[in-house]
Amino acid sequence: MRQRLRERALRAQTGGIISSLLSLLFVVVLCAVLYLARGPILRFAGESWIVEDPLDRADAIIVLSDDNFYADRATHAADLYRHGMAPIVIASGRRLRPYAGIAELMEHDLIERGVPKDRIVRISHNAENTREEAQALAQQALERRWRSVIVVTSNYHTRRARYIFRHVFPSQTIVRVSGAHDGDFDPENWWRTRKSVKEFTRELAGMIVAVWELKGQAKISSVTPAVVGWGEPNPLYLV
């Protein structure tokens, strides 16, 4: 009897060792496969954040705040304007001082790239994130009765921007998003540079926050005071 119990215990111990070895082997093989395939996987992750909507003529091209050093967003917006995609370009920007901010810098970039000054509308605001910026712009879309807009932002920011703007903007306003090439973010090799990794992780965290904050939030359906500031008077506001 004791001999049989010993044999059973030995078989159980041997089986446990074999199972542990097989599990360890599986983990090692899986890690090796992931390591060898890291390039395509990370590339897919980077490219998944980039979306591009089919564009049609709109009432306004909106350039989001915080363009990069190369003014890539302004460059892309100016190109869309030259192709007749909208009659005006909205320079949206955070206030840096009581008398100036990013909107003024963006206006300068747009003029340098061929957009006439009288076709640029500056909107200054105190938004600290994309959601707050979208809320300020949504108020203007409602007041100006924009039927459709093209939102221009950096390529890596397009998915989150589209999600936020389509949740915040009035339901009667069609929102299309167009991504500008960003000199600091290469979707095919983003994990190789510290700045690109920072942008990717910030977008991931920002998307999670946006989904949480906008869950169940109703869209704007009536005009209420908005905390924004306008640039020079422009008759094109009423497009």
Image: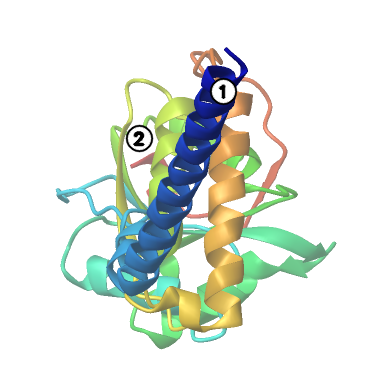
Q: Relative to 134, is 197 above or below?
A: below
Q: Classify mark 1: residues with Cα within 10 Å, few (<14), some (14-19) or many (20+).
A: few
Q: Relative to 8, is 184 above or below?
A: below
The residue that label 2 is drawn on is 146
Taking depth in this image into account, of 76 and 78 the one nearest to the observer is 76
Residue 13 visible: yes
Q: Residue 197 placed where, x, y %?
A: 56, 71
User: Mark 1 is on which residue type?
Assistant: Gln
Taking depth in this image into account, of 239 and 82 the one nearest to the observer is 82
Q: Quick check: 210 left or right of 70? A: right
Badge number at residue 3? 1
Question: Of the residues under marks 2 and 1, which one precedes in the sequence?
Answer: 1
Q: Residue 126 placed where, x, y %?
A: 75, 49
Residue 139 visible: no
Badge number at residue 169? none
Q: Quick check: 50 left or right of 98? A: left
User: Mark 2: which secondary structure?
Assistant: loop
Q: Residue 72 placed where, x, y %?
A: 42, 78
Q: Residue 95 placed where, x, y %?
A: 75, 60
Which image quarter is the C terminus in? top left
Which image quarter is the N terminus in? top right
For image coordinates 75% across by 69% down, the residue present is 100
Q: Relative to 205, is 114 above or below?
A: below
User: Mark 2 is on which residue type?
Assistant: Trp
For image coordinates 47% across by 32% down, the residue present is 11
Taking depth in this image into account, of 165 and 26 the one nearest to the observer is 26
The image quadrant that residue 203 belongs to is bottom right
The image quadrant that residue 88 belongs to is bottom left
User: Mark 1: which secondary structure?
Assistant: helix
Report, in whole angstroms, how far the alpha carbon at label 2 lies from the one at label 1. 87 Å
* Mark 2 or 1: the one toward you: 1
